[in-house]
Image (tube, helix red, strand yellow):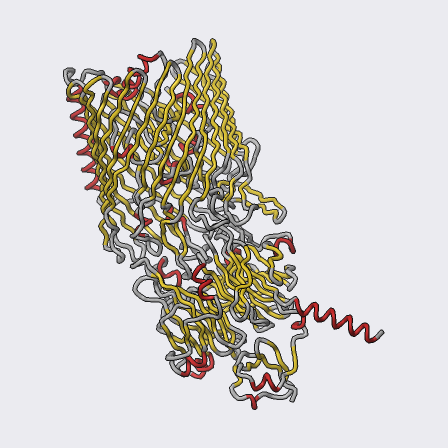
Amino acid sequence: MKRLVTFLLLTLYIYNARAEEKIIILNEGMWQSDNGRISYFENGSIVSNQWFRDKNKKKIGDTPNDIIRVNDNLFAIAVNWSNIVQFIRADGKAVAATEDIPNNRRLCSDGKYVYVTSYGHECETTKGTVYFTKGYVAKIDLSNYKVVATCEVGYEPEGIALYDGRLFIANTGGYAEQEGDHEFETTVSIVNASTMTLEKNIDTHVSNLFGEMSQSGKYLCINSPGDYYETPPCGLIFDCEKALKGEDCYVRFDYPVTYNTTTTDGHFFTVGSAFSYITGSYEFSCLTIEPWTVMKTKGKSGIEEKLPGTLQTDFADMSQPYGIYVNPYSGYIYGSDAGSFDGAGYLYQWSPEGKLLGRHKVYINPGHFLAIPPADWETGISPLMQALLTSAQPVFDLQGRRIENISHMKKGNIYVKDGKKVLRVR
Amino acid sequence: MYVEGRTLMRPCISMKHKNYYLQVILAIVLAFAVTASASAQNPTTSPLSSQELARLDSIQQLHEVTVAAKHPVRTIATSQTLSGADLQALSTTSVADALKYFSGVQIKDYGGLGGLKTINVRSLGAQHVGVYIDGIRITNAQNGTVDLGKFSLSSLESVSLYNANKLDYLQSASEYASGATVYLQTRRPTSDSLSVQFRNGSFFTWMAKANAQFNWKGWQGFIDGEYCSSRGDYPFRYHSEYEDTVGHRTNSDIRYGRVEAALFRGGFSSHIYYYDSERGCPGGIVRRLTGKYTNVGREWDRDFFVQASYQETLLKGLRFKANAKYTNEYLRYCTDYPENQNTARVDNHFRQQDAYGALCAAYTPWSWLSLSTSYDIRYSIMKADLKRFEDVKRVDQKLVFAAQANWRGIQLAASALHQRYSDWTFVQAGAADPLDRWTPAVSLAYTYKGLTVRGWYKQIFRAPTLNDLYYTQAGNRNLKPEYTKQLNFGAEYHLAKNHWQFDVQADIYQNKIENRIVCLPLKGTYTWSMMNYGYTFCRGLNSTIKGHYHIGQWSFSLLNSITWQRDVDRTDPEDEDMYNQRICYSPSFSTGVTGIAAWRSLQFTTSYLYVGERMWSKADPEDILEPYHNVDMKLSYTHNIKKVSLGLCLEVCDVLDIQYEHLPRYPMPGRNYKLTLSFGI
């Protein structure tokens, strides 16, 4: 009997373990049409292109712009033009929403708080309405889903990441072409996450830090589309640790990285194009970036114009690439094509080696992805094997700091390796 | 990802150099007036009376029709007209309201009194529809569209829609230069009168209007003024499987003033117009958990134009016409308000000036043949305080050669139009290369008794507008013109008896639109740019039926229009999702029925409009705008006490209270009422 139960449990476990590709896709919809939608993809097929509606009998809102995982069963979605941050469970059920964070953009979380950037100039907090001249970061307390603190940063702050207790915010100044009172921003703001005070602004001398911003441990991959006129676009690799120490902390290179993602081994995959209103022409590029090499060689190496398998040609064939993502749990690669922008976009899936596995119709402007942890991930932690320890892939602590010397790892502590939480047992 | 498209789409203009242009206007008006009065006093050069000259076009038409039978005016062009009593009987406040009853017309309306209203004919696109007041085009070099909400029906004699263009003997080249043309014909007063009107409508709408007109020694003229304000805070509700949203429209208020005057004498006509408005630009209704952020922007418009036209027969069979117009438009769009902390703080001013002149000549060597030519020149300047924007100047020249023949019921018209656009600007990307093209049109018809059968073909393009080419962070100087090719076959039949009159017409058509100018995001950049993208193909049927019956003091009218069309995307044969799919916002079926019953001065009108299902995105079969039925009713009564007339009019719009949408999440106001009191002497 005991054996049978064990066998059954094992069978069940194996069955569950197979169901490991679960991807949530945010379809932005069209601005002011209230048609943001969530698609849910599981094991090779789209389960629904209106997942949030199916689960909650209501609409997500206008222009969902970012989605992150807070913990194993809580995800946050920045719904830009609905002025809310919507929280959902892994099964898609709405939990709560934080309201009146106008024109919110991007999210990050430390598990206890969610931080969100906003282009707006005011915010509802537990201490009343706070006003800002420029843009700001709001801190949402997950015990009550209310904004408990804010910090003003640059104009139109976009990407946000957490490293060593600090928030790193890429400022864009993206309304500079419409507003008279400021120019494009060139800074990354560093904000103390616990006190929500601005520690410093790092001037990257690169304007308009707009687009996706990916994090690989202490490294950030930041895009600059330039001003679309004289200033050409470029990419930045930014070292958070060096920034905190006050050292030279970024390397600029001449490729735009409009869409980017972190791979399971800590590299960045990027897709971008350079456009100029003066010439009306643009150039397309796909990169694999090894951030530590880029930092070490000041950009002389570590950037390769390639992506695995057929990714590069598949992206080039799309009418409108709109995002790239690597499932941190499995290494499967996803991309999207927004098509004609008033029609449905497509989700692409590739194997970790870059073999195109499928193309699936989703909804308008599919721009943002999030993998749901596979079933065995929910307990989360596996023992760290010696073989893994000696492999080339970097190890990070839970703050996201890369462990340069593995002998510094403490017994009984949890680390992140190969996209998975591991326990140092010996 | 989004762009604030609205600023791109709105017209704009300038009030600078006021003294300078006032002098210019006075000079133009005086020059025409002097010539007009001089010629009117000289019967040898003007064989026709002033009234006859005024209706010269109609008279020409009547000649040809009289030969065939005693039937109303007919042309070989496909046209629809609402005039006189029918026009006034409709429950309408603006030209856009009247046009929605025409066959083949799609209205785009953002809702409320202040919402931008443009029309699209046979799915060609709003920028292919030329709107003309007394034969002179209302232009907007900036965005190429005309907000029809700005033009009142009260001073108009008729509103006509011509597919392709009108075919008269003496037309300016501009009149040939659009895919469809709307003519607003100003009414020439036949007596002296003074009238005032007051109106109160739903959603705190107040309107006052005054009109004074005269007819004195061959001179006719009027002054018409109107002031209106509306809070526009109508309630709305969205009720579906996924939501039950209720609310009041906010930031949908408008106040406007309009003053216009016209002066006519014989072949001379002139018109001066001024419109000043301030309005809220409401956004789409989207999911919000509080009502805190509602403002999107406000807009101010100041439009001014003065125009004059003069036509004259010099020798037998040789006629001339000259047109002149000066336009000055100003637009301000602002989102920079303390309560508007959620979006870009924009405060842009756009100024546009436009000077236009045309000379036309027509020669009729034999009674069956007429040859004409016209040269038009238009000079436009656009200024804006956008970043990275410099003044743009455009010279637009047009030359047309046209011929019309009419022999034993066979009518043939052919024209060749040459257009040349040249731009000058210091915007960084530089001015577009000059555009230089010829386009043809040909029509053939045969009339036998009351029946006419016709066929026509027209090729025409729209030049990229100044916004398309130069707007900051969107403009693309390399745009090609957007071409339309229209083919039409139709028939019409007229029958008139003592007490009744009956007209029916039906046309089948095929349109191709190439190189559509659209704003598209660019591959992997998050930026948008104007592009030539798309090819659409449209086949359809338009029909109209008009019946009038009068007996004793009763009169009845019944008007019906039907549009059926299939409008598909033919851009990319490899794109299964798009190719041969229906174009967004284009219904496959729509129909309108208007019934008017009158007894003495009591009049009752019911208008019914049905518009079928439209897609608003091609992404999901659920992305549709529901079909809608709209019923408007109007009851009016006029009582005369000696020389004073007192009028009372009650209108109920959208009787069924269906809050349909022309654009998703922009609800229409639903049922609303208007009560109008008028006094006249």
Q: Can you say whether B456 is above or below A90 in the image? A: above
Question: Between B621 and B272, which is closer to the camera in this rendering?
Answer: B621
Q: Can you say whether B637 is above or below B379 in the image? A: above
Dividing the picture into quarters, in which one does residue B457 lie?
Answer: top left
- Whether residue B60 is visible here, answered yes or no, is yes
Please give the name of the residue rendered at 29% of the width and 38% of the height, measured from the top-left corner: B304
Question: Between B598 and B1, which is closer to the camera in this rendering?
Answer: B1
Q: Position of residue A342 (x, y in %)?
A: 47, 50
Q: Is residue B360 left or right of residue B502?
A: left
Question: Between B442 and A371, which is closer to the camera in this rendering?
Answer: B442
Q: Position of residue A135 (x, y in %)?
A: 44, 65
Please give the name of the residue rendered at 24% of the width and 39% of the height, measured from the top-left corner: B419
Q: Can you say whether B295 is above or below B541 in the image? A: below
- Quadrant of the drawing holding the C terminus of chain A: bottom right
Q: Is residue B616 left or right of residue B239?
A: left
Q: Can you say whether B431 is above or below A261 in the image? A: above
Q: Position of residue B173 (x, y in %)?
A: 25, 33
Q: Residue furthest right?
A: A1
Q: Residue furthest bottom?
A: A407
Q: Position of residue B562 (x, y in %)?
A: 48, 28
- Whether residue A171 is visible here, answered yes or no, is no
Question: Between B69 and B360, which is closer to the camera in this rendering?
Answer: B69
- Quadrant of the drawing holding the N terminus of chain A: bottom right
Please give the name of the residue rendered at 47% of the width and 81% of the height, measured from the top-left corner: A241
Please give the name of the residue rendered at 37% of the width and 31% of the height, measured from the top-left corner: B163
